Every structure is written in C-alpha cells, then in structure tokens.
Amino acid sequence: MKVGIIGCGAIANLIASSIVPEDNGIDIAYFFDKDIERAENLASLAGGVAVLHFDEMLNDVDLVLECASPDSVKYFAPKVLKQGIDMIIMSIGAFMDKEFYTEILSIAKENGAKIHLPSGAVVGLDGIKAVAKFGLKEVTLVTRKSPKSLGKDIDVEEVLFEGKASEAVKEFPLNINVAATISLACNKDIDVKIIVDPNVDRNVHEITAKGDFGEFKTITMNYPCSANPKTSMLAALSAIRLLKSFNETISVGM
C-alpha cells in the first residue's frame, strides 16, 4: 500500500519513522506540507518524495494520511475521496461540522472510498462503540492539560471550558480531537470539561460512560510529543497501529 501524508509535523514524523515497508507492505512515499522545507526534511528522512503541489501524489497513492488541521481536512478530503482514495484523518474535529460530515460521507460512498478515524489519545473507545446503540445514556470527558500545552502562563488550576464537544472543538481546534472522536463513536454531542492544570505534565483524559449496560470509566495519562506539546504520543501510536492492521490476517478488538 502506497501512502501520501498531508502535514509534516510531530505526528507525521513519528508515524514515518515507525513504518517499515518490509514488515507490513506500507510504503509512505509522498509528503506534502504548506512549508515545503518541512516536507523535504521528512521525505529525506523517510526515503520518500516531497511534493510542491498536493495533486502530484494523487495518481500514485492508495491512501492519504492527514496530519495537519481541521481546515486541511475540509480542503483536501473532498479532493482525495472523489478520486476513490481512502483516507486516515487525524484532525477528527472537522467532522463535528454536521454539514461537512454529511457532505464527506456522501462523497466517500459515491466513489467507493473509506475514511478511517484512529482512536487517538484515549483508550476505551471500543467499549463506547460497543454500547453506543444499547442503552448508552451519558458520556462525559474531563481533560486536563499543562499550561504549556494550551499556551497559558498560569500557576493555579483553571477551568477553560465546560459544555458540548461541538463547541469545544471550535474553541480548541488543535487540542481537543478526543472530544470529537468520542462523540462520533457514540453518535452523541458529549459533555466536555477542559482544565488547565499547572500540576500535571501529561495530557489527561477521563471518560465516563453510563447506561443500561452499567458504567465504565477510563483515565489516559499521555506524555505529550516533545516536538509539539499540544499533541499526545498516543495519538501518533494509534495511527501507526491502524496502518499496520490493514495487512493483518487476524484482527483483535474493534
């Protein structure tokens, strides 16, 4: 499988450095970024090709991996999917725009393309998906991040946001993809609280789900990427795991 990447920042670097074609048949061949130098640097490290114009890769890839931003998803995803090319999308917050979600779903179906959304920076998403249509009544997310990861200079804990996921992704488009991922998994606009906490050095996500099945809670405490504190290591690792799963004969979990 030949892959092209949009966005050559911290996540793309982690993914590209972890995929070995000889092991799983995944060849990350093309790199595109609005900063061509950044694309060239990553392409050089990964043994691929940096493209100045995004369309240059479309005739030679089986899948496009987006690692850029929600705005990039909205601009590039329709182009990719209209070509019948599958996508992995990291900036899942883009799909909280219901009009865009409906549009992109229609394009993908019409052209036989698949959209893959990694589990990202949380655990427990398989459980949420399992119970989503079987009496799930309430899902909440409490996220704690360091001041550095949110661009804040404070020394006391502060609640930055409390409300629905659809509003959270508007206010924090580069920090709260987790809320969008959970909402899409359970088809609910979940309740979200975002706390900036000077006492934490990790990105902490606590998910609580309640319903007819009972109740479960997960706590994920992620170390941020050294190159970008806004991003959790686990987000990149989930995409790596997804890529490698495409060629597995036996798949465990959802």
Image (cartoon, rainbow, N blue to C red):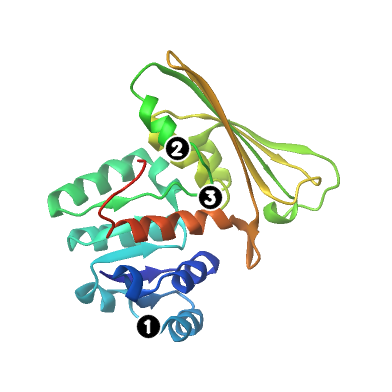
Q: In which quarter of the image is residue 56?
A: bottom left
Q: Are marks 1 and 3 in contact (CB under 8 Å)?
A: no
Residue 186 lies left or right of residue 111; in this view the side is right
Alpha-carbon span between mark 1 and mark 2: 33 Å
Q: How crowded is mark 1: few (under 14 residues within 10 Å), some or many (20 or more)?
A: some
Q: Residues within 10 Å of mark 2 (few under 14, many from 20)?
A: some
Disc number at residue 125? Answer: 2
Alpha-carbon span between mark 1 and mark 3: 29 Å
* Label 1 vs 3, first from the N-terminus: 1
Disc number at residue 48? Answer: 1
Q: Which residue is found at the position 27% from the left and 76% from the top? A: 57
Amino acid at circle 1: Gly
Where residue 191 appears, as percent x and y from the top left, is 54, 28
Q: Which residue is found at the position 35% from the left and 44% from the top? A: 252
Amino acid at circle 2: Leu
Q: Are marks 2 and 3 in contact (CB under 8 Å)?
A: no
Q: Which of 134 and 248 is in front in this view?
A: 248
> Which residue, given by chain and number where applicable, does mark 3 sit on?
173
